[in-house]
Image: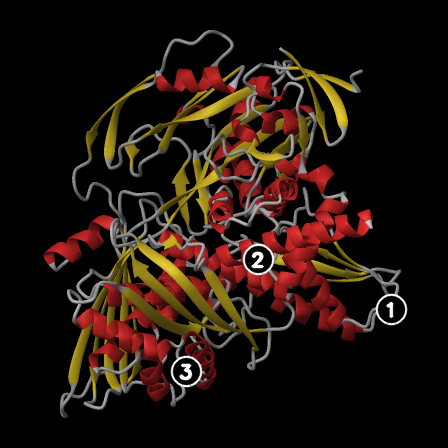
Amino acid sequence: MRIEFTVDGKYYTLSVSSDKPLNLLLSDDLEIKSTSFACSGRMCGLCVVLMDGKAVLSCLVPAFEVRGKTITTFDGFSKTRDYRDIEKAYSSMQNYPCDRCRAARSLLIESIVRRYEVTGGDFDSGEVLAEAALIDCDCMDSDGFLKVVRESILNRRKRKNVRRA
Amino acid sequence: MAEHMRNSQNKSNKFYGTLVTCTDAGVQLDSVTLPELDSRYFTLRQSDFAQDACLSIFSGSIPLLTEDRVLYPGQPVAAIFGPDTESVLLASRQVRLTSHPLEDGDGAPADVFDTLTVGQEEPAEEGEYKTIRSRTRIEAETYVSASALVCECWQEGEKIHIEVPTQWPALIRRNVARLADCPQTNVIVHNMPYQSRHDEYLIQPAILACIGVCAALKCGIPVVLKSQAWSAGPALEVDRTTRCTLDGKPVYEECTATAWLGAYALDDNEFIRQMMAGLLPNYRTKHFKASVTVKRSPSLPSFAYSSAAYSYALFSTERHCTLLAQAFETPPAQWKEYVMADKRPFTDYMPSADLSQLARLDDDIVEMSDFNRKWASYTTQCDDFSILSFNRGIGLASGYSIAGFSTSFAKTSQAQAKITLTEKHNVTLLTSFPENDAAGDMAEKIIEHEMDLGDHADVIILDNDGTMTDSGPDILYRHSGHFPIQLAAAAAKLNLDGSTPPVSLVFDCDEKLMPCEFEQRGAAAVIVETKLDNISFTPIALEAWVAVASDSNISTRHLNAMIRSRVIGTLKECGARISDDPLRPFRVNIVRKDWQAGGLTSLEAALDGLTRASYLSALKLNLSNIAETLPSDEKGIEKAYREGGAE
């Protein structure tokens, strides 16, 4: 089938099998290497990308679901100012993810930050910790992850408020 | 308008393959019936190999494909190749195997045994002593990587190319050259990035590469072979008997350990040396005797498994320490302070050690975690278990770390690297180790520290793809823990050389001149607090405190990530659930101290063992009658809870 979608700001049209997973579309067809860990749906969580701003496991998203969507990978995201907010949070909390999961974890945090940025609701630690379990990597403890997410939200709000002023 | 148009359908220029494996272990194959396949498919059996179809690794070997005896579950029997992965997988499911069980002792190799005695040859019998016995068991674990292992092989003229993530490129090059009957210079290994938890990229990638190359040579076009990377840990049983004076000082200790290392022997003697180093207690005794026996078992062959031999032995040693403290009704922190006043003596396996640094590490986290109060409180709860409505535990363990191979093993290996000072006063480093941010940063720091480089000089870690350098396997934390020490010595030597650049130095990656087998590479102390879930009986890890003595070359960022990863990963492997309670989310509190002994440190091996020991000590406070076996599970805990014993 033919699908059209946007990846990191670029518009693509591909002719692919309808059930081909998104991570293979990205790594094989678009040669984006930051999501190249292929666990074939065994929930390693390392292939997280943002689909319309929400974190998804790209190995579980078939090609037909991607049609018309906007995908953000770590390759594109790491060049944005939004990523700087998260990087600053890692640094100020002295809690860095390992090289293995940095891409997936940063995108997951970005997805949470965007949600709170839009809804502006109270921070729900339980919900955030449940989402953290998506990534099967042990380099960050639960408490550290919560602190980094909170700090990232603060950084984002601070930056956006400064810009508005 | 589309910026790009691509088509992923054109794949007819490659063959895709999969391994046909036998799920039973300890059987003799009677027949292997392959399905009828059209001309787009071909199969590979043991008879298709011109040379001996086995993987030679260390001092042992593993068959690539077997046609007679299947000694471990999942042993490859054949390989099927076809135009796409899906159809090949379907074809592999149609293979029919018939077998019958092997008779006991049918061709089984003999056990390997070694013993160590420190101090008096035989324990003196006079005097009044209290005898404490313990048994620690670890069940064999198999770790399968979440990421798929993909190996691509192709031929270009005389050259054979292999693209695969591997911890030892030279192992693949050597074996492929032997099987393809060509010089090693014709085999080029392109090492793909990998993240290994338990050395799962050591054996399986090499097996895939050998089979893949044979298939590529047979069909003449590139082949892609997919599988899962696995690694197997040993099963272990350690019995320890200590005779202590009535005031709690250990005097005589004897320890018997038995390890089951899978179906094929890779290097049992090295495993024994690593175990011996871990079995040495962190207190002085008049007599200490340890004996280790290695046996074969119908399971996956086991060798390193992230320094399992040392880590598991250290785990049993520290676990026993806590039992000794409990026997004298003293909190482990206080008991350790009492027995760690003396130096640990020199042995063939470890140099003498000043135990006061360990005691100071203990102090740091004991205070921070309020260990003594919690220990007292939880011990009372354990005594009156049925009265109190909560059940919590806390455990402490501390010890030294090691890294790399033993001196005896290093003397037989030829692992080397090359450092060059170029004409422009840049430094290049050539190894076969994979590129890795943390290790690369450390190598740069070491070279800059050891060599007087100008402001504009660069340290370049060369792209090691396809080089003929063999720096040995990237296991047992050699790359991060052992190699930097050799690199520092080589850089200092090159700096003092004074020759006109360019000047190079080829150096050994392992220490061959140490008087004993291993050296202390840092120290750590770990406290873990747990509780039992009241309904599911799952042990939940609430918080951990870690104090480490580490050198300054490793950045805090990498060190903290490594410590968290090791502690959380090990707790999960032990059967614990990490607390995700929003009111008290799991946290690893880290205290970092300088490593006073000097030199570089590697803490991974110790952290694994110490986390296990403190976790099991904590679990034992949760439920005093639980068996000393890891990993723990809910069923065992429930049984211990209801019936008063997990056995």
Location of residue B158 in the rendering, given as x and y in whole percent from the top left corner: 67, 29
Q: Tell me residue B10's x, y (percent).
A: 65, 14
Q: Which residue lies under the disc numbered 3? A: B346
Q: How far apart are the two marked residues, 3 and 1, measured between alpha carbons? A: 43 Å
| Residue on which disc 1 sits | B454
Question: Furthest residue to the top?
Answer: B38
From the viewer's perspective, is A80 left or right of B266? right
Q: Earlier in the sequence, mark 3 or mark 1?
A: 3
Q: Residue at x 68, y 39 (%)?
A: A74
Q: Quadrant of the N terminus of chain A?
A: top right
Identify the coloring. Answer: secondary structure
Labels 2 and 3 in the same subunit: no
Q: Give the residue type that dot 3 points to.
A: Phe
Image-quadrant location for residue B453? bottom right
- Above or below, B547 against B482 in this view is below
Q: Residue at x 65, y 52 (%)?
A: A152
Image position of B581 (left or right of B494)? left
Q: Position of residue A3 (x, y in %)?
A: 66, 15
Seen in the picture, residue A164 relative to B3 is either above or below; the reply is: below
Residue that mark 2 sits on: A147
Q: Residue at x 60, y 73 (%)?
A: B551
